[in-house]
Image: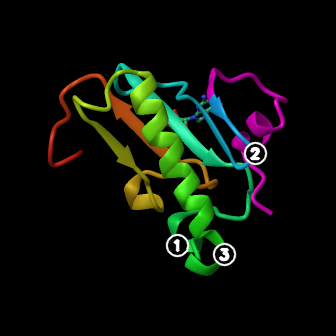
Amino acid sequence: MGETIFSKIIRKEIPAEIVFENDKVLAFKDIHPQAPVHVLIIPKITEIETTKDINSTKHSALLGSLYDAANKIAKDYGISETGFRLVLNCGADAGQEVYHLHMHLLGGRKMNWPPG
Ligand code: 5GP
């Protein structure tokens, strides 16, 4: 279940520019960056395809780990104080392409609102 291009990145079968990794989480640069900093932060388990699959009983610690990673990466890139955006696209209308839960960390420029 849940085999995607990100599964191959987790298994290091295809290359990615990894910026953070621990036992639960992997973070790597987006291949088509939309900002000077554009990192994808993903759980290593593949069972969560979209935000709709998140279950607080099963996944609360994992979600905390994703946010811990985002905060650390933002600090490492020096954008923690200037600001950054975290985006989770869910489903077709949101433009989700890869059905493996991922958080986009975007920063290094002024963001527009509302998003496109
Ligand atoms: P989504 O639209 O599903 O929220 O975002 C998927 C993201 O994954 C896109 O921003 C896309 O550029 C990125 N992406 C897709 N395939 C690859 C890949 O093979 N390597 C990397 N580093 N990023 C990818």
Sequence order check: which comes first, mark 3 or mark 1? Answer: 1
In three-dimensional space, the C-alpha distance between marks 3 and 1, rounded to whole angstroms, equals 13 Å
**Label 2 belongs to which residue?**
23
Q: Which residues are magenta?
A: 1-19
Residue sitting at x 51%, y 66%: 51
Q: Residues within 10 Å of mark 1 (few under 14, many from 20)?
A: few
**Residue 44: % across, % down:** 73, 49
Q: Is mark 1 within 8 Å of ligand 1?
A: no
Residue sitting at x 16%, y 38%: 112
| Left or right placement of residue 8 versus residue 43 in this view | right
Q: Residues within 10 Å of mark 2 (few under 14, many from 20)?
A: few
**Label 1 belongs to which residue?**
52
Q: Looking at the picture, which amino acid does disc 3 mark?
A: Lys
Above/below status of 30 relative to 93:
above
| Left or right placement of residue 71 versus residue 97 in this view | left
Classify mark 3: helix, strand or loop.
Answer: helix
Q: Nearer the viewer, residue 108 or 62?
A: 62
Of tags 3 and 1, the one toward the viewer is 3
Q: Quadrant of the N terminus?
A: bottom right
Classify mark 1: helix, strand or loop.
Answer: helix
Q: Are marks 3 and 1 in contact (CB under 8 Å)?
A: no
